[in-house]
Amino acid sequence: MDIEILLALQNFRNGGGAFLTGWVLERRFVGFSTDVPMITRVSRAAEGLLGYYIVSLIFVPLIKNGIPGPAGTVTSCFVQILYVSFIFPWCLKYLEKPAAELSK
């Protein structure tokens, strides 16, 4: 089997694993909802894009410098997908909680 095809399959498998992990964590611990006003949806989208660019432009190069070769690529893809599927929804839910709930 050609090495490029093998690496593509490996990245697909690892990306799917990251998405599945993030999805299970999000369903179990976050329970993210989209039943919010349109302005909140727009601000969430803008915050999500900004956060994704920060992850992509800062953390991905750090990971790739720390972990050389294909392992660094796989790890950085895992982090990006986990951010999209779990970390960002968790941060939004935490930041959107009323102050009374946070003090408990």
Image (cartoon, grey):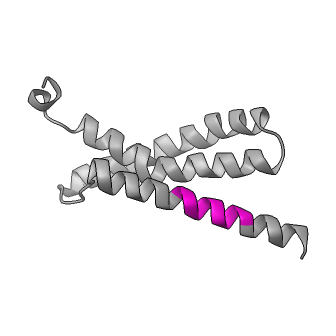
**Does the stretch in magenta take in 17?**
yes
Position of residue 60 in the picture relative to residue 87 (left or right): right
Magenta residues span 10-18
Residue 42 within the magenta-colored segment of the rendering: no
Task: Answer with left or right where residue 85 lies relative to residue 72.
Answer: left
Task: Where is residue 100? Give x, y as percent.
Answer: 9, 28
Identify which residue is drawn at 89% across, 76% down.
1
Write down the quadrant of residue 31 in the picture. Answer: bottom left
Provide the major secondary structure of the magenta segment: helix
Q: Nearer the viewer, residue 95 or 69?
A: 69
Looking at the rendering, in which quadrant would you find the C terminus?
top left
Residue drawn at the location 70% of the way across and 62% of the way down? 11
Report the side of 70 relative to 74 (left or right): right
Q: Residue furthest right?
A: 2
- Give the camera-side residue of 102 and 57: 102
Location of residue 9 in the rendering, given as x and y in whole percent from the top left corner: 73, 70
**Outermost residue, top direction?**
103
**Residue 54 horizontal/vertical position (percent):** 55, 37
Q: Measuring 55% from the left and 56% from the top, which residue is drawn there? A: 18
Q: Residue at x 41, y 49 (%)?
A: 86
